[in-house]
Amino acid sequence: MSAAHRVTAGFLPLLDSALLVAAREKRFAEAEGIDLVLVRENSWASIRDRLAVGHFEAAHMLAPMPIAFNLGLAPLAARTIAPMALGLGGNAVTVADELWREMADYGARPDLDPASGGRALDGIVSRRAAEGGAPLRFAVVHPHSGHNYELRYWLAASDIDPDRDIEIVIVPPPLMPDALAAGRIDGYCVGEPWNTAAAFNGAGRIATTKSRIWRSSPEKVLGVSADWAESSPVALDGLLRALYRAAQWCGDAANHEELAGILAQPGYVGCPAEWLMPALSGRIRTGNGPVVEVSDFFMPHARAATFPWKSHALWFYTQMVRWGQVEPGPDRETVARETYRPDLYRRALRSLGVALPGANAKVEGALTTQTPVGSAGASLVLGPDGFFDGKIFDPDRVADYLRS
């Protein structure tokens, strides 16, 4: 089939660019009449700027970024929507080996448990402060990233104030293992394979994972120029269908070795294929510790992993408010809610007969087990989706959540 629509999309060298890469390499985009051109970038700022000036129609994007753009929190940001998510999970928190040994002395368990790890870190932070030592320095990839918010959530729930008790700096994902090895940072939160890279290279220890801090939690989305989406609905629908088929393919364990080989190529993630397999298999190599089974570490397809839940958008908005990035207000809440566009997802995918949730938002943290839910098309199972501290986020009670 000759491509009727050329779509240029930016991405960063991360495992969760897999849906875009598979859509091109396995020709799902071509089958939808899409000539999908992928451009590798090294920073999220470059993704933002090139989308804003029209170099990209779409991009692999941090899930909170489109919300930040539309709230005016970023320079040179165009109006952006998220008509699709690109999977659940995929992140971890990695610490220097020396820090991990201290954490273990303070009771951190080797099974990626966030509660024991957080308590241990709190003990170390408190001791350092009492001794007049320098605060620990952790890195995240961007101020408006799931990494920043989940790291802060974990720390705050562990009685560590992320703004006073530690230092948080910004480092591009591929540079984090080297920054850790050089002693420039004590730990970081990043997507794969850059946690596994430190574990393989002997520079760090994976302490916990995103899927243990908040199960079935969002990570990247397809960020799309709102102007392009409005002017090119046929191309957008074709792109979403191609990405959905790519998600199905990426979610099949039988394809994981091939996927790792494709992503490992220099034009994509550019790393040894063996660095990608732990996240794909769910067998997490922690470093000098055990291999830990985390079956839901990265989910590209199951549990409605590509659905752009408005409750996810609103949770990110609450974190922006919590950490002083934006003032709360009903207009800003509306902006956040309307940035995620499940209506466009439904429009594109209804013809495929796929599982479409019966609602656009859900209570986050309420499901403790896998639960069948109402859906159009195929049957749908969600959850578990709990936060490690047992908290619940009701998207209909945003103001109450912020007060808490």
Image (cartoon, rainbow, N blue to C red):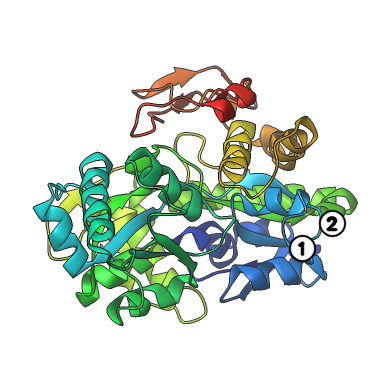
Pointer 1 with pointer 2, Cβ within 8 A: yes
Please tell me whether residue 85 is drawn above or below residue 31 in the rendered image. above
Q: Position of residue 237 (x, y in %)?
A: 75, 47
Q: Report the front residue among 388 and 242.
A: 388
Q: Which residue is mark 1?
A: 57
Give the left or right position of residue 383, taking residue 25 as reference.
Answer: left
Q: Give, as a three-letter code, the residue at label 1.
A: Glu
Using residue 106 as the reference point, say whether residue 59 is left or right of it.
Answer: right
Query: Which residue is drawn at the image coordinates 51% and 49% (left, top)?
Result: 247
- Is disc 1 placed on a helix, strand or loop? loop
* Residue 390 in the image: above or below residue 167: above
Q: Secondary structure at mark 2?
A: helix
- Residue 79 position, x and y percent, is 81, 54
Residue in the picture at 81% in, 59% down: 78
Q: How many other residues sit within 10 Å of disc 2, few (<14), some (14-19) or many (≥20)?
A: some
| Nearest the eye: 382 or 390 | 390
Residue on which the image places disc 2: 228
Q: Is residue 340 above or below residue 362?
A: below
> In the image, 183: left or right of 174?
left
Query: Looking at the rendering, which quadrant does residue 296 occupy?
Result: top left
Question: Does residue 294 sit above or below 69 in this rendering?
Answer: above
Tag count in the figure? 2
Amino acid carrying mark 2 in the image: Trp
Residue 317 appears at what percent x and percent y?
63, 40
For the question of whether residue 367 can be seen, the reply is yes
Looking at the picture, how far across and down is residue 159, in whole percent?
34, 41
